[in-house]
Amino acid sequence: MKVVVGVSGGIAAYKAVGVVRGFVLAGHDVHVVATEAALRFVGRPTLEAISRNPVHTELFEGVAEVRHVALGQSADLIVVAPATANTLAKIAHGFADDLLGTTILASEAPLVLAPAMHTEMWNDPATRANVALLRERGVTLVGPASGRLTGRDSGPGRMAEPEEIVAAALAVVGPRDFAGRRVLVTAGGTREPIDPVRFVGNRSSGRQGVALARAAAARGAQVHLIVANLDDGVAPADAGITLEHVDTAAELEAAAGRAAAEADLVIMAAAVADYRPDEVAAGKIKKETQGDTLELRLVKNPDILRGLVDARREGQTVVGFAAETETDREALLELARAKAARKGVDYLVVNTVGWSTGFGTPDNSIVMLSGSGDILTEASGPKASVADRILDVLAR
Ligand code: C5P
């Protein structure tokens, strides 16, 4: 999809870089149109490197290709972040005195604005009237959030976070083929305590599970997302997602059991520790008293996925994941087919993981099997686009 990101001149322009990056990572072709003022806050090279395209500012550049309208005509989506009070006013009244204005006027694409300004400006009757006019015309506004502003002040006016803007914008254009569906997703990796300060864990960042939750929400689902120990910055703040935090496999089992009772679709993407320490020491284990070796006795955790399959409600679909280190494709698929049968899932998503692949990386490569072991789809790329390919199968 061709996305035009308009950047106007406010301090929040530095966060526009995150918005551009979000669309690029979701696999879109991004073109930045920055106002002159915006380029005083964030550098052109940054926006060009992140968007992987030239940045446009000038109305009188590219005249031969009629650029002042070409960008708008060819865009599938226009997002303005930040939209300052001035830019908001200009858009509301159809001004075309700069490239952003002509691009928006010449476009029939959905328009999403992320306002950012001081609270007094946001509350001013002129801005209120402009916002009402824009909403009436079907423009989507994301934010502003309430919080610390640039000066010493705080209140409504802070630009929404980039991920939230990207998710809201994609939801405006994306298919709504999960509307009305209640989806449970688990993500992240459980930690099984050894003593009050140590645990047995795994390297799951939670990115693929979170990407699935966000994609489902963007496509209209009501999502319950249970997360265990996500990497920093991975937790979503999207509308349509209810977030629940857990730590251990036992907590995940209880939370997933409760939430699955309300779900039409269960996606078990979390990396659950197969074993936990048999006994948890009440105090920190000390090497001074322990000596040269320390033996940990581990006991098996319940298979949560198997439990969910056994308790499956009428019409509920259950999807499992398999992270394997097997590199031979046929051997990997054999393992996966056996796992799908053993767990009784409707679908199994298989990916290879290793020291440098799968866990914690922005990209993933998956094969999706039916419960009976047929290959339904294969996808590689950013976790957001892999999530959409998985949902394409589940939407059928
Ligand atoms: O058996 P294995 O760990 O390979 O299976 C992976 C799938 O099973 C994933 O969907 C994971 O969330 C789930 N699982 C589980 N409970 C466990 C171990 C894995 O639900 N104790």
Image (cartoon, rainbow, N blue to C red):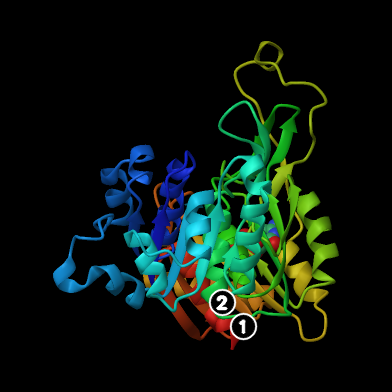
Residue underneath mark 1: 177
Q: Is residue 52 left or right of residue 394?
A: left
Give, as a three-letter code, the residue at label 2. Answer: Leu
Identify the residue shown where x is 25% and y is 56%: 58
**Placement of the C terminus among the 4 image quadrants:** bottom right
| Secondary element type, mark 1 | loop
Q: Is residue 57 left or right of residue 125?
A: left
The image's mark for residue 249 is none
Verify CB contact (< 8 Å) between mark 2 and mark 1: yes
Q: Give the mark, 2 or 1, whose residue is nearer the N terminus.
A: 1
Identify the residue shown where x is 27% and y is 51%: 48
- Report x, y in % for residue 125: 68, 52
Depth check: give the residue in front, 171 or 215.
Answer: 171
Does the Cβ of the disc 1 residue fall within 8 Å of ligand 1?
Answer: no
Residue underneath mark 2: 391
How many discs appear? 2
